[in-house]
């Protein structure tokens, strides 16, 4: 079974600065997808960014980018030019290719952007 | 926009009550999920449904059951609520197109069992 580990329960960053959230995972599979989801306070969980394991190029979405290290099973999220609206709980998640069943989530990192 | 709607944001129920949590999605998604969210534990899958009347147990199905009589609606049932079921419950849906598909979440139901 796969596991997803987020070792930073809480982090803070100054507005306009850059922050990196860590995620490691464990799987014996070769084909899978990795995701970062964001859960703002009292709001719905939304997808931030997605990475296909077979792609070597790191995914980017505006100020959000990932550092995907397949051999190390590491999938970190970098937020550049942090904004107050980035304050949220961030979850790393994993799913096998060909399966829409169980998304496995990490325990989450609470990010606070300070003015 | 995909919309996943959970019937209640907050619920307070008594121990031993039968509790129904309802979830409706409006994008004709095949897959629907119920997760439980607890601090420090992330999201844990309770049940999953990939079609009408079809269901699979997730990681923590004990004490819960589900119903999916229509494609757009997925209900979570607590047969006899207990205090250890006090938690945030999240419903999600996705298209059945392999692992690449994004899951869309409802706003969550915070259930307190007293």
Image (cartoon, rainbow, N blue to C red):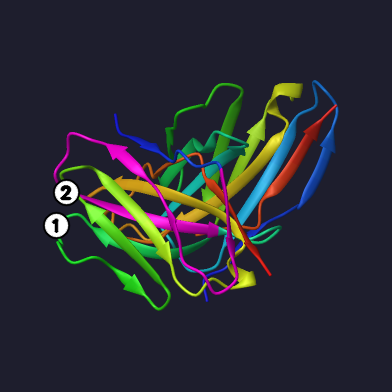
- Read off the chain for label 1: A
Q: Is residue A35 above or below residue A16?
A: above
State whether residue A66 appears in this view: yes
Q: On the image, numbered disc 2 is attached to which residue?
A: A31
Please report the residue visible at 75 percent of the width from the left and 39 percent of the height from the top: B111
Q: Is residue B102 left or right of residue B3?
A: left
Question: Between A20 and A34, which is closer to the camera in this rendering?
Answer: A20
Magenta segment includes B45: no
Q: Residue at x 69, y 58 (%)?
A: A41
Magenta span main SS: strand
- Determine the image quadrant of residue A39: bottom right
User: Relative to B75, is A6 on the left or the right?
Assistant: left
Instruction: State which quarter of the image contains the C terminus of chain B.
Output: top right
Neighbour tally class for label 1: few under 14, some 14-19, many 20 plus, Cα within 10 Å: few
- Quadrant of the image occupied by residue A88: bottom right
Residue B13, position as x, y percentages in the image = 84, 33
> Callout 2: residue from which chain?
A
Q: Residue at x 40, y 63 (%)?
A: A78
Residue A54 position within the rendered picture, expressed as x and y whole percent measured from the top left:
14, 57
Q: Which is more N-terminal, label 1 or label 2?
A: 2
Return the mark for residue A96: none
Residue pointed to by mark 1: A54
Is the Cβ of the residue at disc 2 closer than 8 Å to that at disc 1? Answer: yes
* The magenta stretch spans residue A18: yes
Residue A26 position, x and y percent, is 27, 35
Question: What secondary structure is found at the residue carrying circle 2?
Answer: loop
Q: Position of residue A31 (x, y in %)?
A: 16, 48
Q: CA distance from mark 2 to mark 1?
A: 7 Å
| Residue B25 in which image quadrant | bottom right
Residue range corresponding to the magenta coloring: A10-38
């Amino acid at each position: 079974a796969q596991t997803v580990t987020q070792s930073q329960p809480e982090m803070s960053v100054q507005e306009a600065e850059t922050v990196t959230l860590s995620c490691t995972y464990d799987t014996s599979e070769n084909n899978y997808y990795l995701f970062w989801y964001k859960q703002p306070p009292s709001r719905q969980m939304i997808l931030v960014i997605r990475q296909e394991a077979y792609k070597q190029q790191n995914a980017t979405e505006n100020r959000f980018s990932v550092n995907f290290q397949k051999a190390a099973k590491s999938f970190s999220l970098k937020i550049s030019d942090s904004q107050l609206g980035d304050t949220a709980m961030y979850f790393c998640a994993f799913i096998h290719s060909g399966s829409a069943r169980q998304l496995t989530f990490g325990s989450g990192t609470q990010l606070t952007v300070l003015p | 926009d995909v919309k996943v709607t959970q019937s209640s944001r907050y619920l307070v129920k008594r121990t031993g009550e039968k509790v129904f949590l309802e979830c409706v999605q409006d994008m004709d998604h095949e897959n629907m999920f119920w997760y439980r969210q607890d601090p420090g534990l992330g999201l844990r899958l309770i049940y999953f449904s990939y079609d009408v009347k079809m269901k699979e147990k997730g990681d923590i199905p004990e004490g819960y059951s589900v119903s999916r009589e229509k494609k757009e609606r997925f209900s979570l049932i607590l047969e006899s609520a207990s205090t250890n079921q006090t938690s945030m419950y999240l419903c999600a849906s996705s298209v059945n197109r392999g692992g690449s598909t994004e899951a869309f979440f409802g706003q969550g139901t915070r259930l307190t069992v007293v």
